[in-house]
Image (cartoon, grey):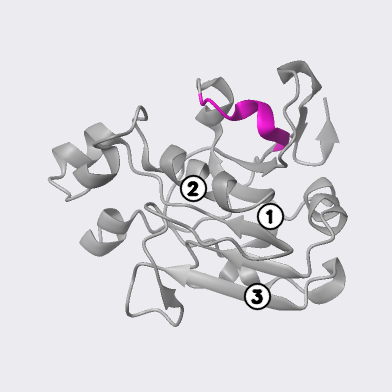
């Protein structure tokens, strides 16, 4: 496997299976004219069309070879007015990073979490009211502290990645705390 891809947790999203009707509705209902990806990578998630009311895209990435503004979004994400974050954050478990001798300890030092994507979620939820993140399905059973900000979770049967088989969900967050029983859970397009 490509060492840079592993080190940066880069698994680019190539297919639009994630854009289910309820996910499209969440984007549209946010009324945000700006789509913002703090882990922009190849920019595939920002290529969604203006039919959702989005007329500006903005991306950040730590990889200097990509076309985006350089930023370490695991440490800080700037807030942008009227923006929705749409992203596929890096996923790297702490034990995996240690075993592969990756230099990621600075992220885990002051963190209660055991995977980078939880740290990414915290930064995103600090920065913006609306966050859409493609994350591992194991999130649903995690003890993540801001899980009550989840608006909906869509379990995807088809994986939108070419290079990983990790079962994933599309997690849509708003800034309203709710009881876990009130969070909408979908499998593909069907509400259950």
Kindly identify the residue that appears in the image at 37 percent across and 53 percent down: 75
Along the line of sight, which residue is nearer the eye, 106 or 192? Answer: 106
The picture quadrant where one finds residue 178 is top right
Q: Callout 1 environment at 10 Å: few (<14), some (14 to 19), or many (20+)?
A: some
Residue at image mark 2: 123
Q: Secondary structure at mark 1?
A: helix
- Residue 14 seen in the current view: yes
Does 42 sit left or right of 160 as displayed? left
Q: Quadrant of the C terminus?
A: top right
Residue 32 position in % (x across, y down): 78, 63
The picture quadrant where one finds residue 36 is bottom right
Q: Callout 3 environment at 10 Å: few (<14), some (14 to 19), or many (20+)?
A: some
Query: Do the CB atoms of the residues marked 1 and 2 lie less than 8 Å apart?
Result: no
Residue 17 numbered mark, or none: 1
Residue 38 position in % (x across, y down): 50, 62
Cα distance between the residues tagged 3 and 1: 20 Å
- Residue 41 seen in the current view: no
Residue at image mark 3: 57
Kindly identify the residue that appears in the image at 31 percent across and 58 percent down: 8
Cα distance between the residues tagged 1 and 2: 26 Å
Q: Nearer the viewer, mark 3 or mark 2?
A: 2
Residue 189 sits above or below residue 1 on the image:
above
Identify the mark nearer the N-term, 3 or 1: 1
Q: Nearer the viewer, mark 1 or mark 2?
A: 2
Q: Secondary structure at mark 3?
A: strand
Q: Which residues are magenta?
A: 144-153
Q: Is residue 32 magenta?
A: no
Query: Do the CB atoms of the residues marked 3 and 2 lie less than 8 Å apart?
Result: no
Cα distance between the residues tagged 3 and 2: 19 Å
């Amino acid at each position: 496997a490509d060492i840079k891809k592993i080190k940066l947790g880069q698994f680019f999203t190539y297919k639009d299976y994630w854009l289910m009707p309820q996910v499209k509705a969440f984007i549209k209902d946010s009324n945000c004219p700006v789509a913002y990806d703090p882990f922009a990578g190849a920019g595939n998630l920002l290529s969604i069309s203006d039919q959702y009311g989005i007329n500006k895209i903005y991306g950040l990435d730590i990889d200097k070879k990509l076309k985006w503004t350089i930023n370490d979004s695991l440490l800080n994400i700037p807030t942008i007015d009227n923006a929705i974050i749409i992203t596929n954050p890096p996923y790297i478990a702490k034990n995996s990073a240690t075993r592969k001798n990756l230099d990621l300890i600075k992220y885990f030092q002051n963190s209660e979490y055991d995977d980078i994507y939880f740290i990414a979620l915290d930064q995103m939820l600090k920065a913006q009211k609306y966050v859409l993140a493609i994350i591992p399905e194991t999130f649903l059973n995690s003890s993540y502290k801001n899980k009550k900000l989840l608006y909906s979770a869509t379990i995807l049967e088809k994986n939108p990645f070419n290079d990983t088989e990790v079962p994933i969900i599309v997690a849509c967050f708003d800034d309203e705390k709710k009881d876990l029983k009130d969070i909408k859970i979908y499998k593909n397009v069907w509400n259950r």
